[in-house]
Amino acid sequence: QVQLVESGGGLVQSGESLRLSCAASGRTFSRYNMGWFRQAPGKVREFVAAITWTADNTYYANSVKGRFTISRDNAKNTVYLQMSSLKPEDTAIYYCAATSTVYSDSFYFTSLYDYWGQGTQVTVSS
């Protein structure tokens, strides 16, 4: 069992940065691949980024590639999402999630994640 709690969201202006954190409980956190997703009002939840449990590999949506960086610290049971050059279209609730799937092609699909946090709001004003 893994419980996830996101933090770090807020209101920023276009071009600014934010770092989201996702704190996990449970001894097996280090064995889960982790993802960040986001959901804007009236839209479906979409993939943002993922990182393997070893942190050897990372994956990004095209819309955030080059602006966002996912990382993790297994000693602290925490995964991060550093967001730079934020745009108004990045406004959404951001969720972290844990998956036991080992297939990287699966990281993009919400249905293959086992555990989810409650989300943190990110609002980017123009």
Image (tube, rainbow, N blue to C red):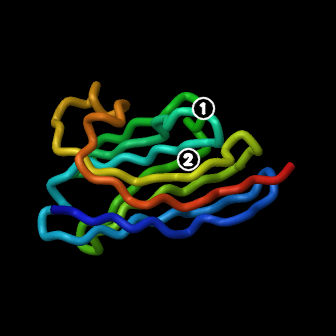
Query: Residue at the location (24% across, 71% down)?
Result: 25
Instruction: Look at the picture and state if 112 lies above or below 27.
Output: above
Report the side of 38 relative to 80 (left or right). Answer: right
On the image, numbered disc 2 is attached to which residue? 68
State the residue in front, 102 or 4.
4
Query: Residue at the location (82% across, 53% down)?
Result: 125
Residue 51 - label: none
Measured as percent of width and height from the top left, residue 103 is found at 20, 30
On the image, numbered disc 1 is attached to which residue? 63
Disc 1/disc 2 C-alpha distance (Å): 9 Å
Measured as percent of width and height from the top left, residue 119 is found at 48, 58
Query: Residue at the location (17% across, 44% down)?
Result: 100
Q: What's under tag 2, amino acid-wise?
A: Phe
State the residue in front, 66 or 9.
9
Instruction: Look at the picture and state if 123 lies above or below 49.
Output: below
Considering every residue shown, the one lying at the far top of the view is 105
Q: What's under tag 1, amino acid-wise?
A: Ser
Rendered image quadrant of residue 59:
top left
- How packed is label 1: few (under 14 Cα within 10 Å), some, or many (20 or more)? few
Query: Residue at the location (54% across, 57% down)?
Result: 82
Rendered image quadrant of residue 120:
bottom right
Report the side of 18 relative to 80 (left or right). Answer: right
Considering every residue shown, the one lying at the far right of the view is 126
